Amino acid sequence: MSNFNSRKLILLSATAVIMLSSCATIRRTSYDQAVATTPIVQAPLVADLEIDPSKKVRSQYRAIKMNETQAKQAVLWQAMKDNGCDVIVQPVYELAIGRKVIDASVEGMCGRYKAVRKPTLEDITLLQELDAARPMFDQSITIYERGETRWTRSKGKSLIP
C-alpha cells in the first residue's frame, strides 16, 4: 500500500505543480480622464496629389470573420501599405465570399500627397468653384471606360458619340 500512496502523492504533486506553473495572471487597468471640450483651431492645409495613371497597383487580402465592408477596408489598407501609397484612386474591388472567409482584392492607381502647404488665394478660389459645381454632378451616373474614347452611362446611353 505504501507504494500506491507514494505514487498517488507524486501524481498529485506533479499535477499541482503543472496547474500552478501553467497559469498566468494578466492584470490590466485603465482610467478615464476628462478632456477639455474647447475646440482646437487648426489652419487648413492643401496638398497636390501625384497620380501615375499608367501604373496600376493590385493587392489581395484574406479576411476571416469580417463582413464585406471590413474586408474592403482591410484590402485597401494592405494595398496602400504594400505600395507606399497615401490613397488608392478609383479602387475596383473583387470579393470572393465564402462561409467564414472573404478573399478580397483591389486594383487602382497609387496616389501620393506632395507639396503640403497653407492654401494660397488661388487654392481657395479653386476650392470654392469646385464646391459650387458639386450639384452639377449626378451621383446616379456611372461612367465606364471602354477602349480609349468610349464613355457610357450606366443606362447604356453614350456620352460621347
Image (cartoon, rainbow, N blue to C red):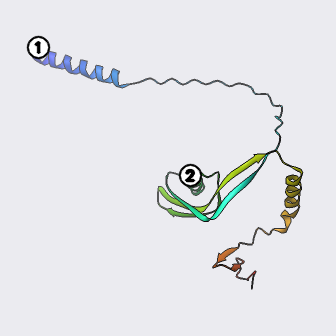
| Residue position for label 1 | 2
Q: Residue at x 18, y 19 (%)?
A: 8
Q: CA distance from mark 2 to mark 1?
A: 64 Å
Q: Secondary structure at mark 2?
A: helix
From the viewer's side, name the closer residue of 84 and 28.
Answer: 84
Q: Position of residue 72 (x, y in %)?
A: 58, 56
From the viewer's side, name the closer residue of 81 and 113.
Answer: 113
Residue type at tag 2 = Ala
Q: In the displayed structure, would residue 102 be above or below residue 154? A: above
Q: Position of residue 129 (x, y in %)?
A: 88, 60
Q: In the displayed structure, would residue 151 be above or below residue 131? A: below
Task: Answer with left or right where residue 97 lies relative to residue 147.
Answer: left
Quadrant of the rendered structure where residue 151 is?
Answer: bottom right
Quadrant showing the C terminus: bottom right
Residue 74 numbered tag: 2
User: Marks 1 and 2: in contact by CB < 8 Å?
Assistant: no
Q: Is residue 17 visible?
A: yes
